[in-house]
Amino acid sequence: MDMRTRVNTALKQAMKDRAASRLATLRLINAAIKDKEIAARGDGEEIVIADDDVLAILSKMTKQRNESARAYEEGGRLDLAERELEEIAIIEEFLPKQLADSEVVEAVRAAVTQTGANSIRDMGKVMGALKAKYTGQMDFGKVGPLVKDQLCSGGDC
């Protein structure tokens, strides 16, 4: 079952269960997917985005909510922070299991070896390989420094 179908099935179930907060979050997910499809339209033809694109959307939504929750906590708005964390939990139901730190380090090493990268100039190739294989499974904001460290270990940075 593709991601869009899973989201729509969960949306229908939330309607049946009358789960208002879950329903609102699932509608936000659907709206983000539709926005991406509308943006991808070129010559008026219907385009259905792939699961990888949906995973990227969900990862971005999770990251945004984490930042918002942190800001709300710093501002003393714990009720809003809690709502953001609830939305994160719902969104993460559709994301694949996140890799552990040791698995991320091993994935970076494998990507560096696979791409034949040997300098910091090859960082884009390594990140592209990681994004192609591990979309939704790791935070690429945290992976960037790991890739840089791996490529700079030769001392040419």
Image (cartoon, rainbow, N blue to C red):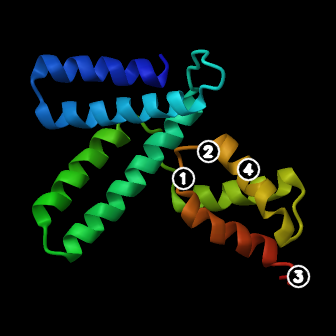
Q: Report how far apart the C-alphas of labels 1 and 4 lie in the structure.
A: 13 Å
Q: Which numbered disc covers residue 138? A: 1
Instruction: Give me the residue at 36% from left, 35% from top.
Output: 29
Kindly check if marks 1 and 2 are in contact, taking CB atoms under 8 A apart as contact: yes
Say left or right for 22 vs 133: left
At label 1, counting other C-alpha atoms closer than 10 Å, the crowd grade (few under 14, some 14-19, many 20 or more) is many
At label 2, counting other C-alpha atoms closer than 10 Å, the crowd grade (few under 14, some 14-19, many 20 or more) is some
Q: Report how far apart the C-alphas of labels 3 and 2 lie in the structure.
A: 27 Å
Instruction: Say what amino acid the circle numbered 4 marks.
Output: Gly
Secondary structure beneath disc 2? helix
Residue situated in front as seen by the camera: 143 or 52: 52
Secondary structure beneath disc 1? loop
Which-is-in-front pick, marks 1 and 4? 4
Q: Which numbered disc covers residue 134? A: 2
Q: Which numbered disc covers residue 156? A: 3
Q: Give how far across and how far down residue 131 sits, in percent.
A: 66, 47
